[in-house]
Image (spheres, rainbow, N blue to C red):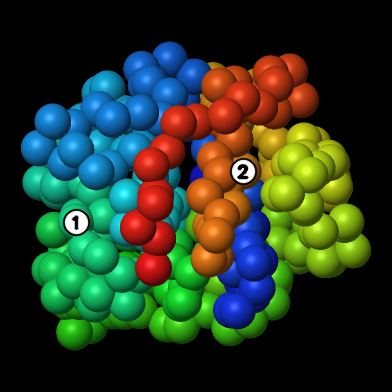
């Protein structure tokens, strides 16, 4: 399961800050964020080379879209579409609200269960699809102002061992300063391997990979308000082992 930590502050110089660890099979091939889709020239995203989709991306209109699997839904299903297409479909839109609405119009049963974060400088959305949703469509819920955490469970769900243990730690951590480049407080939290004795690695933010499944990359994103440019820092490996480096993004038309 992956982890997204989001601080949403409408009207702030940096309206949305995102810290995201990607957990995946260590042998699954992927590429660091870039302009990998000729038919989507305005999208910067990491590429999953096995299925051709992405787990996290931005577009030039200032929309960010990230994907997380829900509990018990790891692995492919031959009768389902790849969930990696979902962030790309979201990034076809010029605002987070439009993107979230578009995902809710899809047939949920075409995909295995998922969570999505979709946001821009004006709004943020948690989009969910699970087998328990009888109407067959994903749902979208606005994310309120403040700091939130999303894993394989619901948003801020205390049933998640990871959320229960680490959300208070993120709320106590120093707020990143994108202008100064200081993300120290969040980086420390994204590198946290601590968990309780019952849930083992599922309760950690950084998974060390004892069974071939591990944290394989990490992202720090600051969506820009007026007179600023969106920042994406990317660690192409475990964030406790690999440094974060800037990702070239072009979001001069941020909403």
Q: Residue at x 25, y 37 (%)?
A: 53
Q: Nearer the viewer, residue 201 or 91?
A: 91
- Position in image of residue 57 (x %, y %): 38, 45
Looking at the image, residue 186 lies above or below residue 62: above
Looking at the image, residue 197 lies above or below residue 135: above
Residue 139: name its quadrant: bottom left
Q: Residue at x 12, y 68 (%)?
A: 107
Query: Can residue 183 be seen in this snapshot?
Result: no
Q: Residue at x 70, y 21 (%)?
A: 243
| Whole-number angstrom distance, CA of label 1 to CA of label 2 | 22 Å
Q: Nearer the viewer, residue 111 or 148?
A: 148
The 10 Å Cα crowd at callout 1, few under 14, some 14 to 19, many 20 or more, is some
Identify residue for label 1: 92
User: Please, which residue is most extreme toward the front here?
Assistant: 227
Query: Can residue 53 be seen in this snapshot?
Result: yes
Q: Is residue 196 left or right of residue 60?
A: right
- In the rendered image, the quadrant that contains the C terminus is bottom left
| Tag of residue 220 | 2
Q: First in sequence: mark 1 or mark 2?
A: 1
Q: Residue at x 32, y 50 (%)?
A: 60
The 10 Å Cα crowd at callout 2, few under 14, some 14 to 19, many 20 or more, is many
Q: Is residue 132 left or right of residue 199?
A: left
- Position in image of residue 162 (x %, y %): 70, 55
């Amino acid at each position: 399961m992956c982890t997204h930590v989001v601080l949403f502050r409408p009207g702030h110089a940096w309206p949305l800050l995102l810290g995201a660890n990607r957990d995946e099979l260590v042998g699954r091939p992927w590429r660091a964020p870039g302009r990998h889709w000729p038919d989507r020239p305005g999208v910067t995203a990491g590429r999953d080379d096995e299925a051709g989709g992405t787990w996290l991306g931005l577009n030039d209109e200032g929309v960010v879209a990230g994907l997380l699997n829900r509990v018990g839904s790891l692995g492919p299903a031959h009768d389902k579409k790849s969930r990696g297409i979902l962030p790309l479909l979201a990034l076809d839109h010029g605002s987070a609200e439009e993107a979230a609405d578009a995902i809710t119009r899809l047939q949920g049963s075409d995909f295995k269960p998922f969570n999505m974060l979709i946001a821009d400088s004006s709004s943020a959305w948690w989009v969910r699809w699970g087998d328990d949703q009888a109407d067959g469509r994903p749902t979208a819920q606005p994310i309120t102002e403040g700091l939130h955490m999303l894993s394989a469970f619901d948003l801020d769900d205390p049933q998640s061992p990871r959320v229960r243990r680490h959300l208070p730690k993120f709320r106590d951590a120093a707020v990143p300063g994108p202008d100064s480049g200081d993300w120290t407080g969040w980086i420390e939290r994204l590198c946290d391997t601590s968990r309780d004795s019952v849930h083992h690695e599922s309760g950690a933010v950084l998974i060390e990979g004892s069974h071939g499944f591990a944290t394989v990359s990490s992202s720090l994103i600051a969506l820009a308000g007026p007179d600023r440019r969106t920042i994406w820092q990317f660690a192409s490996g475990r964030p406790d082992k690999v440094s974060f480096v800037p990702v070239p993004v072009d979001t001069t038309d941020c909403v």
